[in-house]
Amino acid sequence: MLAITRPGGQSCVVQLLLISSSNVHGYGFLQHPEPQIRRFLSRKRRVAFCPFAAHDHDAYIAKVRERFAQMGFEIIPIEDLDRAEAIFVGGGNTFRLLKKLYERNLLDVIRQRVRAGTPYIGSSAGTVITCPTIRTTNDMPIVEAQSLNSLGLIAFQLNCHFLDPDPNSTHKGETREQRLLEFHEENTTPVVGLREGTMLWVENDSHRLLGEKPARIFRQGKEPIEVGPGKWLDEYLR
């Protein structure tokens, strides 16, 4: 793995923990990824939280602050990035999140901080915005962002909460897989389907799947493949 070099020759590593969902069946809020969050943040303590994917920012901040305090971390406002040792962007509606980040001129700021070495945790919508665009989100466009382009911290797309088809369902609409195959009728970027209970640990150009289930990887012109927990995904994402 190659480290990014800052001006002056000092190297740093882009570090991302990209969680498919904050809520997993059988677990409380952020309980399933807690061991990985603790390990990822290591000696860090102050985490800047971005609540913009939700409608009620105050309620969301209070919920996250209480949960992170249980893990030994302090939540501070996203506007206080200069004091932050890490960043957490929570889930909700991806279009609303991206719109707010553009309006508050925070997209470039977050991108620069992460590329300078600040660890980034995303969940659901907060995970999707690390992609080049938000074109593979599941959310409805309840608001219109000025662009679909997002942080671009990874070179591929993610689909969080990826759902397998239910063989007993009588639903005749598109399955999640059909929609992602449709994405590749118009786009060449690989897509990783992250099922609930899974996450990616990213260090620069290395991507490892963690959690309980395999990921499903979609590439234009190829059959989708399954890659199990603990595996590195790099060879499939080039």
Image (spheres, helix red, strand yellow):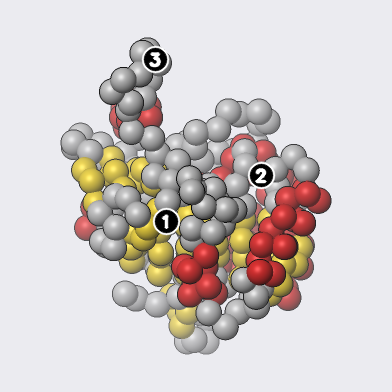
Between the C-alphas of marks 3 and 1, the distance is 28 Å
Q: Position of residue 97 (x, y in %)?
A: 65, 44
Query: Does residue 40 lie above or below 151 as drawn?
Result: below
Residue at (70% x, 43% y) in the render:
54
Q: Position of residue 7 (x, y in %)?
A: 53, 81
For disc 1, the marked residue is: 199
Q: Nearer the viewer, residue 217 or 162?
A: 162
Between the C-alphas of marks 1 and 2, the distance is 19 Å
Residue 53's disc is 2
* Mark 2 closeness class: few <14, some 14–19, many ≥20 residues within 10 Å: many
Callout 1: SS: strand
User: Of callouts 2 and 3, which one flags the residue occurring earlier in the amino acid sequence?
Assistant: 2
Marks 3 and 1 in Cβ contact (< 8 Å): no
Kind of residue at disc 3:
His
Q: Position of residue 232 (x, y in %)?
A: 27, 62
Between the C-alphas of marks 2 and 3, the distance is 29 Å
In front: mark 3 or mark 1? 3
For the C terminus, which image quadrant? bottom left
Residue 171's disc is 3
